[in-house]
Image (spheres, rainbow, N blue to C red):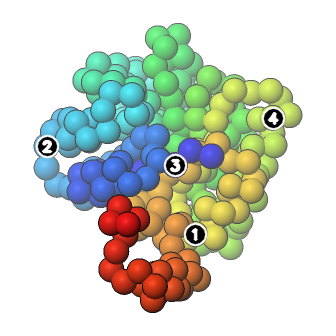
């Protein structure tokens, strides 16, 4: 499973790009608006941090298929490296996806809440679908079960579309997506940090440190 960062905060992207094996960055209009500065400058700053090979996703704003395609073409031109356009599922979005497929622009069909929506998106040629795990859990659904069903359905029909699960609020949601065979998850920096944190790990490392120091003091291997 690939880890992607779901933010436009440059400090978080810089940190996670250095310390975690992330394959790219996803944004959406809400994430971009939170930064409250020039849109193109945000994309450029993200690209400067992640380099040309990691994938950057940005979402279209126009509502008609033609408008979505024009925005996607412009984003793809200016993204300066590996790029995927995020398009919310809907009739116009599906029409745009079929057109963008012919142009070779990668599409992440977003705002997915059911396996049925995901299947239609994949058939239209979407490279990725983004089911919203936490938002499903919040309405007494099961985000992880929806992810599992989408993964199974794509495998059943041999569809190459990847499941890029989004909207996470805790580590358990991420773990359940991983066991479901989800291809990618996009997480905030806080959730990514929480994934590797465990109090037992901290206790184990503290034990190693104190046992070592009881014999070798402050010396490290390089000092011996
Ligand atoms: C990604 O495609 C989504 O835009 C995002 O992860 C939604 O997350 P939220 O439910 O925390 O807003």
- Cα separation between marks 2 and 1: 32 Å
Viewer-closest of 13 and 95? 13
**Residue 15 shown left or right of residue 221 in the figure:** left
* Left or right: 62 as drawn, with respect to 95: left
The kind of secondary structure element at disc 2 is: loop
Return the residue at label 2: 38
Q: Of marks 2 and 1, which one's residue comes earlier in the chain?
A: 2
Q: Residue at x 55, y 71 (%)?
A: 170
User: Marks 3 and 1, Cα distance to the nearest angstrom?
Assistant: 13 Å
Which residue shows up at 45% across the image and 24% down it? Answer: 65
The residue mark sitting in front, 2 or 4, is 4
- The mark found on residue 171 in the picture is 1
Q: Which residue is mark 4?
A: 155
- Residue 171 percent location from the top left of the image: 58, 69
Which of the numbered marks, if any, corresponds to residue 3? Answer: 3
The answer to whether residue 39 is visible is no
Q: Depth-wise, is mark 4 or mark 3 nearer the camera?
A: 3
Q: Earlier in the sequence, mark 3 or mark 2?
A: 3
Verify CB contact (< 8 Å) between mark 2 and mark 4. Answer: no
């Amino acid at each position: 499973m690939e880890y992607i960062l779901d933010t436009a905060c440059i400090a978080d992207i810089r940190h996670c790009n250095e310390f975690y094996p992330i394959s790219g960055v996803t944004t959406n209009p809400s994430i971009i608006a939170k930064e409250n500065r020039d849109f193109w400058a945000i994309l450029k700053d993200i690209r400067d941090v992640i380099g040309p090979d990691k994938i950057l996703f940005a979402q279209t704003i126009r509502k008609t298929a033609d408008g979505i395609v024009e925005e996607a073409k412009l984003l793809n031109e200016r993204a300066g490296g590996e790029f995927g356009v995020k398009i919310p599922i809907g009739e116009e979005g599906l029409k745009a996806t079929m057109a963008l497929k012919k142009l070779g622009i990668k599409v992440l069909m977003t705002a997915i809440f059911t396996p049925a929506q995901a299947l239609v998106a994949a058939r239209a040629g979407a490279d990725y679908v983004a089911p919203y795990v936490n938002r499903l859990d919040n309405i007494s659904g099961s985000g992880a079960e929806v992810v599992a069903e989408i993964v199974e359905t794509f495998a059943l029909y041999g569809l190459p579309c990847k499941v890029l699960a989004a909207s996470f609020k805790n580590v358990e949601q991420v773990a359940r997506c991983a066991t479901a065979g989800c291809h990618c998850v996009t997480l905030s920096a806080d959730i990514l940090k929480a994934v590797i944190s465990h109090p037992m790990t901290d206790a184990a490392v503290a034990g190693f440190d104190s046992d070592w120091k009881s014999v070798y003091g402050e010396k490290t291997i390089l000092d011996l």
